[in-house]
Image: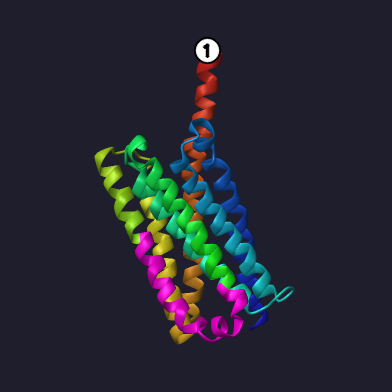
Amino acid sequence: MSIMYQEVRITVEVVSVIICFILARYMIKPYLLTREGRYVGLPLGFAFLGVSYVIAAFAYSELYYFSELLWIQLLTRTFAFVFLAVTYYFSNKPAKNTRILWDLTFSLLIVSLIALFLVIFIFPQVASNNYNESQMYIRVFNIICLLYIVIHTLRTHIRKPDPTTIWVPLGFILFAISQYSLLFWYTDNSLTAFTGSLTLRIMALAVFLAVAYRSFAEGKKTKNEKVSA
């Protein structure tokens, strides 16, 4: 690993961590107001993304490295996309009819993630030998989850057009292309694909941050102005 590659990768991971935790802080507000379990998926998804970037930063800095770290960050990131996809799936469903199904799905995802972590630590040799091949399939699965979210959010925007909501599918499209670019990086060691992937990731997170700020921070400001009036 070259020094330049290492420094760029760590910088991107740190910036990604900061943005993801800011997004999680914004997106936890609907859950705190309603206590509806299905609203916890968005902040949890971005929190999982943030954790995956924290682990990646440690792994690529080589300050605290063991082979299982790569698996942990990959699985954590994948489950983040799954949480987001599941959250969007349940978002338009009646809360009363889907509460039990949501709780069951949420519990199964958590148990599955813990089980996979245990497999990695109990059988580290198996995990290490299958990492390079497995990550290709996992990236494809990530792209499928992201494309589902793109389709869902586009349909929602078409039903209720809003200047803000159109940016949401754009952000997930950038995320999907970022994951797709990594496939070329892993197969051909394409520096262009690698650089493009990191750039697209930051752009996607920046889009989500702008949407979250406009939706929550400016909404709160407008509410306070009405109260003052």
Residue 122's spot in the image, x, y percent? 61, 77
123 magenta-colored: yes
Q: Which residue is mark 1?
A: 229
Label 1 secondary element: loop
Which residue appears at 60% of the width and 50% of the height?
A: 21
Query: Is residue 167 something that shows in the picture?
Result: no
Tell whether position 159 is magenta: no
**Residue 34 in view here:** yes
Task: Pinpoint residue 178: horizontal percent, then vertical percent.
Answer: 44, 67
Q: 46 or 82: which is nearer to us? A: 82
64 up-or-down from 208: above or below = below
Q: Residues within 10 Å of mark 1 (few under 14, many from 20)?
A: few
Seen as rendered, the residue at the extreme left is 159
Instruction: Judge whether 35 appears above or below 38 on screen.
Output: above
Q: Give the residue displayed 60% in from the left and 81% down from the top.
A: 124
In the displayed structure, would residue 184 be above or below residue 11? below
Where's the N terminus, which quadrant? bottom right
